[in-house]
Amino acid sequence: YEPKLLAWQHKMKASIFACDEAAVFSNEKIQVAPGVVTSVVDSDLKCEYGGDSQSALNSWIFIAVWDKLIDDGNYKRHDWVVKVDPDAVFFPDRLGRILAGHGSAAFINNCKFGMHGPIEVFSRAAIDTLATDYEDSWDGKAPSTCVNKLHFGQWGEDMFIDQCLKTALKVGPSPLDERLMCESHCDCPAWYWCNNGTDRVSYHPFKTVSSYENCMANALAAGSSASAGTGSSKSIGATGVSSQVSHSGDDLQVAQTMQSQLSPTPSELSPTRTPKAAHASDIDTALKSGVSTSKVPPPGPRAMT
């Protein structure tokens, strides 16, 4: 289901493709959308399932992905690095507004039970620290302190990167902000209806294009209703994206990484563009016509082209 989601997101300039820079990582070269070709990572992208929740034990896969992202170095042009799953309905403009209030955070926890993988938000400084730990390893392909100090054989990538930064590398602070994500695994029953507030950054999971589109329309309708008569709000545009595509037999699995840049002062923030009407039919028309109603004006001079 991931290739169809990515193709739709790219066509509609939604989710990660509402950003200014896009890149895709895989273990082979694949065109996932027009002009979007994967960058190859050093991994077979296969893993077992296990742990308390019988989830993917994919820490080593993402160790390879972060290694490639660090080697590419594009993250250094941005203030924030965000990993987003393809089946998470994601609104970069909402994230920008929230990050404006987290300027001192090293990374942000998205769930009271611990960081969950659909969306993970890191500062550039946190990734710089991670990069230094990669440099300290004998081959430069894994974060030395994290791999040697943590017993992560039964962990997923989200728990690994959380504990790598927080426990092994002592990176912080990492405040909890539940506005980043709404999913059933984090006690957010409204995930299915996608109407849990006007500032919810992501809803997860939606594995078909039709369900993804419906979720986006519901979320935008709720946001448009709440903003009626209140005037424009300030927002910060997201500026970069990357994703990992993995092959396992006949299955294609995708995880995405987004980089976003914050303007340094509130005076530089741009107004959010909201739909002119709150009705889902209007939003659906906008989506089908190729207009991304969640897209914000491009950032200032630091934005990439």
Image (spheres, rainbow, N blue to C red):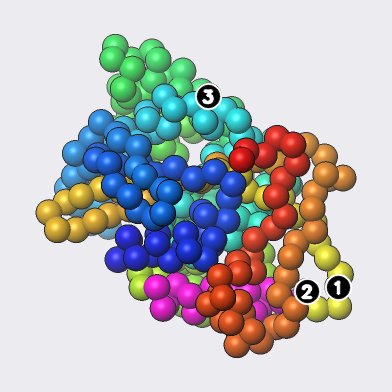
Q: Residue at x 49, y 33 (%)?
A: 166
Q: Whole-percent x and y of residue 253?
A: 27, 54
Q: Amino acid at mark 3?
A: Asp
Is residue 274 visible from the viewing direction of this image?
yes
Q: Quadrant of residue 94?
A: bottom right
Q: Are marks 2 and 1 in contact (CB under 8 Å)?
A: yes
In the rendered image, the vertical position of residue 264 relative to residue 92, given as above or below: above
Quadrant, the C terminus: top right
Q: Which is more toward the observer, 99 or 104?
A: 99
Q: Whole-percent x and y of residue 227?
A: 78, 74
| Residue annotated with mark 3 | 128
Marks 2 and 1, how far apart in space?
5 Å
Q: Residue at x 20, y 50 (%)?
A: 247
Query: Which numbered tag is attached to residue 144?
Result: none
Number of marks: 3
Ranked by sequence position, the earlier of labels 3 and 1 is 3
Outermost residue on the left side: it is 249
Marks 3 and 1, how far apart in space?
40 Å
Q: Is residue 4 left or right of residue 251?
A: right
| Residue annotated with mark 2 | 227
Q: Whole-percent x and y of residue 279?
A: 66, 87
Segment colored magenta: 209-227
Magenta includes 18?
no
Q: Is residue 45 left or right of residue 14?
A: left
Q: For the residue carrying disc 1, how many other residues have a C-alpha within 10 Å: few (<14), some (14-19), or many (20+)?
A: few
Marks 2 and 3, how far apart in space?
38 Å
Q: Amino acid at mark 1?
A: Thr
Q: Residue at x 46, y 52 (%)?
A: 84
| Residue annotated with mark 1 | 230
In the rendered image, the vertical position of residue 131 relative to residue 186, given as above or below: above
Q: Whole-percent x and y of residue 241?
A: 50, 45
